[in-house]
Amino acid sequence: MAAVKELIRGQQDGSVSFGDHTLAEKAKLDNFVNSGDVYKVKTYSALTKLEKNGMFLYESVPGTSIENFSEQENGVSFNVSGNEDAQITLGMKDDTEYEVFVGGSSVGKMSTGLGGKLSVSVELAGMGEVAIKVVEA
């Protein structure tokens, strides 16, 4: 998958694609409007971060490129690529159990605490694009 050269873009289905893990220097874009929501993205080879309406939504270390990031009432789904394995943190509901799917296979159930953050490790090196889906259990 190619990096999102415009840093973030809206898709026809209402999802967003963002991040450029190929950048050597940090780049950011504020006040991107999509479907009535305001997004802020920061991205480069070491980190990719997305906020929606001032709230934390996504972060990866090292940086990643995301296609079709979509929020549903019971979770999120997206495709991710990067040069190295990544630690991805998602902003989800507080105190909720989720089932996490990586590449179409369940990797188990995980719970969020009061902060609503859920962390997932994803093998990306040499993998191309990997589908991630997180749904309430």
Image: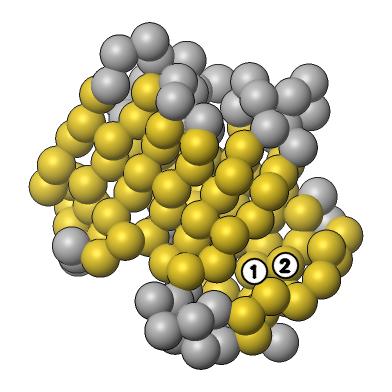
On the image, numbered disc 2 is attached to which residue?
100
Which amino acid is tagged 1? Val
Q: In which quarter of the image is residue 55?
A: bottom left
**Quadrant of the image for the N terminus?**
top right
Name the residue located 76 percent from the left edge and 76 percent from the top edge. Answer: 109
Q: Do the residues labelled 1 and 2 touch (CB within 8 Å)?
A: yes
Which amino acid is tagged 2? Val
For the question of whether residue 65 can be seen, the reply is no
For residue 136, side relative to residue 29 (left or right):
right
Label 1 vs label 2: CA separation? Answer: 5 Å
Name the residue located 54 percent from the left edge and 79 percent from the top edge. Answer: 112
The number of callouts visible is 2
Q: In which quarter of the image is residue 53?
A: bottom left
Residue 108, position as x, y percentages in the image:
82, 71
The image shows residue 62, relative to residue 37, as above or below, that is above
**Quadrant of the image for the C terminus?**
bottom right
Direction right: furthest residue:
105
Name the residue located 18 percent from the left edge and 62 percent from the top edge. Answer: 54
Upstream in sequence: badge 1 or badge 2 = 2
Residue 56, position as x, y percentages in the image:
31, 61
Residue 87, position as x, y percentages in the image:
59, 45
Element at label 1: strand
On the image, numbered disc 1 is attached to which residue?
134
Mark 2 crowdedness (10 Å alpha carbons): few <14, some 14-19, many ≥20: many
For the residue pair 102 and 59, the one nearer the viewer reads as 59
